[in-house]
Image: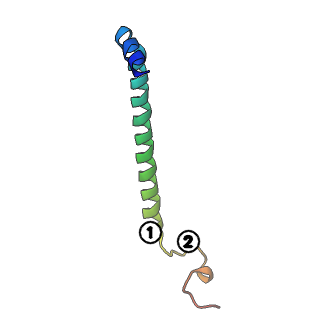
Amino acid sequence: MSTLLWSLAKENPWPGLALASLNLVVALSLVALSLLLGVTMALLAGLHAFAGERSWIAPRGLQRGSPAP
């Protein structure tokens, strides 16, 4: 089977080149999406850590560690 594919590729390489370039585009877009999601998650985690236990997130009586009224 590989001999048949090799003989076809020697005659007309354009379909193989088109498929390879399509694979490259898909791979690069998946890498970009992964990086974008990673940066977004890091920003959200940083904002969450920065916000901490601020009073505008939860009313004073509902915050963890506060004595019961």
Residue holding disc 2: 56
Residue type at tag 1: Ala
- For the question of whether residue 44 can be seen, the reply is yes
Count up the numbered dots: 2
**Mark 1 residue crowding within 10 angstroms, few (<14) / some (14–19) / many (20+):** few
By what rule are the colours in the image chosen? Answer: rainbow
Among all residues in the image, which is located at the extreme left?
A: 10
**Mark 2 residue crowding within 10 angstroms, few (<14) / some (14–19) / many (20+):** few
Residue type at tag 2: Trp
Q: Where does the image place residue 66, in percent across and percent down from the top left?
A: 56, 87
- For this rendering, which residue is in front, 13 or 18? 13
Q: Where does the image place residue 4, in percent across and percent down from the top left?
A: 42, 16
- For the question of whether residue 13 can be seen, the reply is no
Q: Quadrant of the N terminus?
A: top left
Residue name at image x 45 percent, y 63 percent: 45
Q: In which quarter of the image is the C terminus?
A: bottom right
Residue 2 falls in image quadrant: top left
Secondary element at image label 1 = helix
Among all residues in the image, which is located at the extreme top?
A: 11
Secondary element at image label 2 = loop
Q: Is residue 47 above or below residue 22?
A: below
Q: In this view, does 44 lie above or below 26?
A: below
Q: Where does the image place residue 56, in percent across and percent down from the top left?
A: 56, 71
* Gap between marks 2 and 1 measured at Cα: 14 Å
Instruction: Indicate which disc residue 19 carries.
Output: none
Q: Nearer the viewer, mark 2 or mark 1?
A: 1
Residue name at image x 62 percent, y 80 percent: 62
Residue name at image x 47 percent, y 73 percent: 52
Residue holding disc 1: 49
